[in-house]
């Protein structure tokens, strides 16, 4: 198990290098001069050129890229062109809000998605199955920004039960968490139903029922446990996606997370902030995937034996 974890951690290196190269190339080719943006449009050309030289923007592409990689390896992502603060500090300050929103969103998704998927699978082609699959398809198809706006209109504008935006109290997190959770719940519901349908048709399930095992025990202990691998995969992917910053949802609800920070940095061509945010998202997503792979071993003993 330890060797496997170390191997996966080493595999993060080429992934991060590839991500940084792609993002650096895109930001390098994007129109706009960071030095001009920092000094303003009316700044003298000599001052702009001096700042470009100081920042190393006149160096060749590869020189700039390897300078960025070397600094990033030491944890130094530079300073924001806009706020003048350390980029790493900005991200660390924003991450707790994103983690809080992602955790609540995934909890809502799991609480809704897994039970509904199990019931739909055990009552295939029933009215409950048809209605739940309709809403699951609706949830997958519905854009998050539109759903967020509808929730704001209903619960914040019309009913005035909840705040429309902001951060700080439990009430502020309800609407954005519902927006993310219901969307993720639709995906988890469909995967749970599909995985459960495949398992409950197996011979050992029929044998358990023939032996007189209670139906609840058959479903929860035998069927669900063997159907968990794809469900855990989907939940892990959704959690990793949300930790990367739910860009549209954070923007709609003015949530001070990494997704909103990234959008603002892209709009202002704040190259150090964009690069640091993307690297952080890539590392976070890879760590979540590693945790999911390790969790497989505790769910399925066959996978644990392969690690040995």
Image (spheres, rainbow, N blue to C red):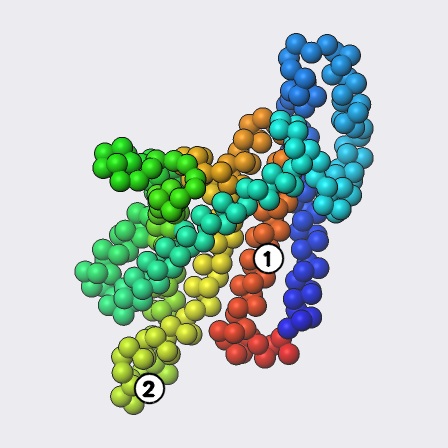
**What's the residue at 35%, 63% (across, down)?**
114
Locate residue 69, reporting x and y percent.
75, 42
Query: Quick check: 271 left or right of 293?
Result: right
Secondary structure beneath disc 2? helix
Vertical side of 157 occupied by 294: above or below: below
Judge the density around disc 2: few (<14), some (14-19), many (≥20) Cα neighbours within 10 Å: few
Can residue 140 be seen from the camera position used here?
no
Task: Name which quarter of the figure residue 189 lies in.
Answer: bottom left
Q: Quadrant of the C terminus?
A: bottom right
**What's the residue at 70%, 53% (across, down)?**
13
Secondary structure beneath disc 1? helix
- Disc 1 marks which residue? 287
Asked if disc 2 and disc 1 are in contact, CB closer than 8 Å, the reply is no
**What's the residue at 79%, 18% (across, down)?**
50
Cα separation between marks 2 and 1? 39 Å
Task: Name which quarter of the figure residue 25 lies in.
Answer: top right
Task: Name which quarter of the figure residue 289 lies in.
Answer: bottom right
- Disc 2 marks which residue? 207
The numbered mark, 2 or 1, whose residue comes first in the sequence reads: 2
Locate residue 79, reporting x and y percent.
69, 33
Locate residue 153, reporting x and y percent.
28, 34
Pick whichever, 168 or 232, lies toward us.
168
């Amino acid at each position: 198990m330890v060797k496997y974890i170390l191997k996966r951690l080493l595999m993060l290196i080429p992934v991060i290098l590839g991500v940084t190269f792609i993002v650096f190339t895109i930001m390098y080719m994007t129109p706009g001069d960071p030095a001009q943006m920092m000094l303003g449009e009316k700044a003298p050309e000599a001052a702009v050129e001096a700042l470009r030289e100081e920042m190393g923007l006149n160096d060749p592409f590869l020189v700039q890229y390897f300078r960025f990689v070397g600094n990033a390896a030491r944890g130094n992502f530079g300073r924001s062109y806009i706020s003048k603060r350390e980029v790493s500090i900005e991200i660390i300050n924003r991450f707790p809000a994103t983690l809080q929103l992602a955790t609540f969103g995934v909890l809502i998704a799991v609480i809704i998605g897994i039970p509904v998927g199990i019931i739909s699978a055990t009552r295939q082609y029933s009215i409950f199955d048809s209605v739940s699959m309709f809403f699951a398809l609706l949830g997958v198809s519905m854009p998050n920004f539109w759903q967020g706006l509808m929730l704001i209109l209903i619960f914040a504008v019309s009913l005035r039960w909840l705040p429309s935006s902001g951060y700080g109290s439990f009430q502020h997190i309800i609407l954005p968490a519902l927006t993310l959770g219901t969307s993720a719940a639709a995906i988890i519901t469909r995967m749970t139903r599909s995985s459960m349908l495949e398992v409950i048709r197996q011979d050992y399930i029929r044998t358990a029922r023939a032996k007189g095992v209670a139906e609840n025990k058959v479903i929860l202990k035998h069927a669900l446990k063997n159907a968990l691998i794809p469900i855990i995969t989907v939940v892990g992917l959704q959690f990793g996606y949300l930790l990367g910053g739910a860009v549209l949802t954070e923007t709609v609800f003015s949530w001070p997370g990494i997704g909103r920070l990234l959008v603002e940095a892209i709009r202002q061509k704040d190259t150090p902030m964009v690069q640091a945010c993307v690297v952080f998202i890539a590392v976070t997503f890879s760590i979540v995937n590693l945790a999911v792979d390790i969790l497989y071993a505790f769910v399925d003993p066959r996978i644990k034996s392969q690690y040995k």
